Amino acid sequence: MTAINVSEATADRLRLLASAWEVDEEGAISRLIDRLAAGATEDPTPQSSARADQVEVYAVYDGRRVSGLYDPRTKALTVTSTPLEGSKYKSPSGAAIAVVQATNPKVNPNRNGWTFWTVRSTGDTLQSLRNR
């Protein structure tokens, strides 16, 4: 076995990731490399904050990944990560506009939320759930 030198902070993060995935550190590194090799863009960390009636979504804007929960019944979207963690919007577009404003206030924030957000479980745009 070959040793790899990392900072204590990186080692702590690796142990945390391994614990979340219920594998050892080597297993966590292997999984990360496999995802990179497969070209995966999905967030590899498990998320369990969604209620049964909500859909986990994410958006990548300006190089940052933002997570959220979409409620198909009300069409509302709650941002669950920074920069707007806990903020609830009446529509996916309202949430998308807020994310753009918070991330890059110098640009026009108007966005179509149905194409801005991606369904975490399928990789499809939120538009795929619009008329259900």
Image (cartoon, rainbow, N blue to C red):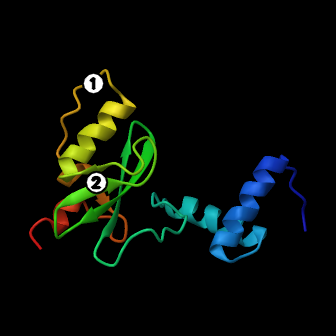
| Residue 55, above or below 126 | below
Residue designated by label 2:
117
Most foreground residue, 65 or 90: 90
Secondary structure state at the residue bearing disc 2: loop
Tell me how far mark 2 sits from mark 1, CA to CA: 18 Å
Disc nearer the start of the sequence (2/1): 1
Quarter holding residue 114: bottom left
Q: Residue at (45%, 57%) from the top-left corner?
A: 41
Q: Tell which residue pokes out farthest to the top in this image.
A: 106
Residue 39 coordinates in the image, percent (x, y):
49, 59
Secondary structure state at the residue bearing disc 1: loop
* Amino acid type shown at disc 2: Trp
Residue 69 coordinates in the image, percent (x, y):
33, 62
Question: Viewed as shown, does residue 26 lie left or right of 89?
Answer: right
Q: How many marks?
A: 2
| Residue 104, above or below 127 | above
Most foreground residue, 37 or 96: 96
Question: Viewed as shown, does residue 105 lie left or right of 48?
Answer: left
**What label sits on residue 116 in the rendered view?**
none
Residue 73 coordinates in the image, percent (x, y):
16, 70
Quarter holding residue 101: top left
- Callout 2 crowding tier (Cα within 10 Å): few <14, some 14–19, many ≥20: many
Which quadrant would the N terminus be assigned to in this image? bottom right
Q: Are marks 2 and 1 in contact (CB under 8 Å)?
A: no
Quarter holding residue 124: bottom left
Question: Viewed as shown, does residue 38 lie left or right of 88?
Answer: right
Q: Tell which residue pokes out farthest to the left in this image.
A: 131
Residue designated by label 1:
107
Q: Residue at (33%, 79%) from the top-left corner?
A: 52
* Amino acid type shown at disc 1: Val
Question: Viewed as shown, does residue 132 lie left or right of 79?
Answer: left
Q: Residue at (20%, 44%) from the top-left corner?
A: 94
